[in-house]
Amino acid sequence: MSYGGNRKPLAAPRTDGAINNLRAVVVLFVIAVHSVLGYAASAPHAPIAFDRPPYNWRTFPVLDPHRFIGFDVFCAWADVFLMPLFFLVSGFFVWQSLERNGAAGFVRRRASRLVPPFLVGVGILLPIAVYPAYARMALHPGLAGYWQHLIRLPFWPAGPMWFLWVLLVFDVLAAAGFTLLPKQWVAMLSDLAARTPKRFFATFLVLSLLAYVPLGTAFGPMRWFQSGPFSFQINCIGLEAFYFFAGVVIGARGYDRVLPMLARRWKRWAVAAIALFGVWLAVSAKTFTTPSPSLFWQFADAVALVPACFASCCAALGLATRFAGTRARALDSLRACAFGMYWLHYPIVVWMQYAVLVIALPAIAKALPVFVCATAASWAVTALLLRVPVLGALVGGGFSMPRPKPRPLPTYTAAISD
């Protein structure tokens, strides 16, 4: 079989539109998770000191006395698969961009898109976002006192911005692989994914177990690495890396050849996702309700999470490909603003939660307005910023970079932008 010459475009319009719509909807899920975390029944009930380990305010910057256990289930489900899905879909678009721009051009373009938002996010947005976590416990909640406490922390809060720098590291590693490894390997693996999907998905599941179980067993589900503004969840980093590079392989010859297979069996994947999430939830309860869970239960929790994550990702991709391929004005706007909404929403969520602390309402009645207001505000502000050249680059497609001269592609012509 030849792996050079002309090839078909990356994706059929419906499949391409479905993935772009899915990426936008996933951002809404991220906003929803942050909107309800402070109302989860399992969240700490005692106030959290700002300057004392383990600094749990990084996860729960505002804790409301009103709680709803349904939010625990929703957050647990999102935690199982949402970020691996993010990385998987991000990988779909990497290989054809490398072929179009070359490794150096690809890295420059990705850095222009990710580095400025990361720096502005951790330098400006996150200090604004976490002030309520300090003010809730401070005797004198002034800005000067807040700044002194903030700079004395052994880290710098990064919040959702961690995703940007980790994604850039994965992009750089993909560019290195593009330069150093035989390109036919990736094309062959991508073809295998399309020709033998059952074998590919079985291998995918086994390799994802190897990527997650050792770290998940050793560190448990809540350990984070943090150095300065750079952080990641230790147990998940191997799984997220695997999903990203699996996405690179799937997208190398066209993810439209794999996703329709998931769409045809979307009902089975949806049932499997619900059932396997239930299995993981039952096993995970043992580790969360036991102060010092045994190594067996930590291992069982890690093993149960991987198929739950896999099934939920397949269900999401299948449902999106089956039902979300159409275009609409609202979806077009959401797609255009999704990156900016991810970048902007966190301070809005935290300050909204802080503002409604004094209101005696059930948790659902608080969380819903927080989500709606954060979504609407981040969407509207992003749409406005996109009209301003420099600010629009922060929330849109990155800063202008010189494009390389056109050159023949070794594979196919990509149908999407960087």
Image: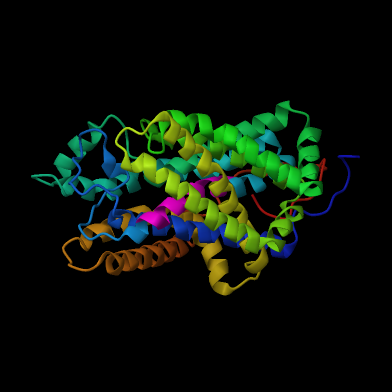
Q: Is residue 213 left or right of residue 266?
A: left
Query: Visible in this render: residue 82?
Result: no
Residue 55 placement: quadrant? top left
Residue 270 placement: quadrant? bottom right
Estimate the x, y position of residue 121 in percent, counting from the top left: 39, 45
Residue occupying the point 79% across, 50% down = 413
Q: Is residue 32 left or right of residue 199?
A: left
Provide the major secondary structure of the magenta segment.
helix
Estimate the x, y position of residue 211 in percent, counting from the top left: 57, 33
Q: Is residue 223 left or right of residue 318?
A: left
Q: Which of the pair 323/19 is nearer the observer?
A: 323
Q: Is residue 32 above or below residue 300?
A: below
Give the residue at the far left of this rendering.
139
Estimate the x, y position of residue 171 in percent, counting from the top left: 60, 37
Image: magenta residue range:
72-87
Q: How is the image coloured?
A: rainbow
Q: Which of the pair 229/357 is nearer the observer?
A: 357
Residue occupying the point 40% across, 56% down = 73
Residue occupying the point 24% across, 47% down = 44
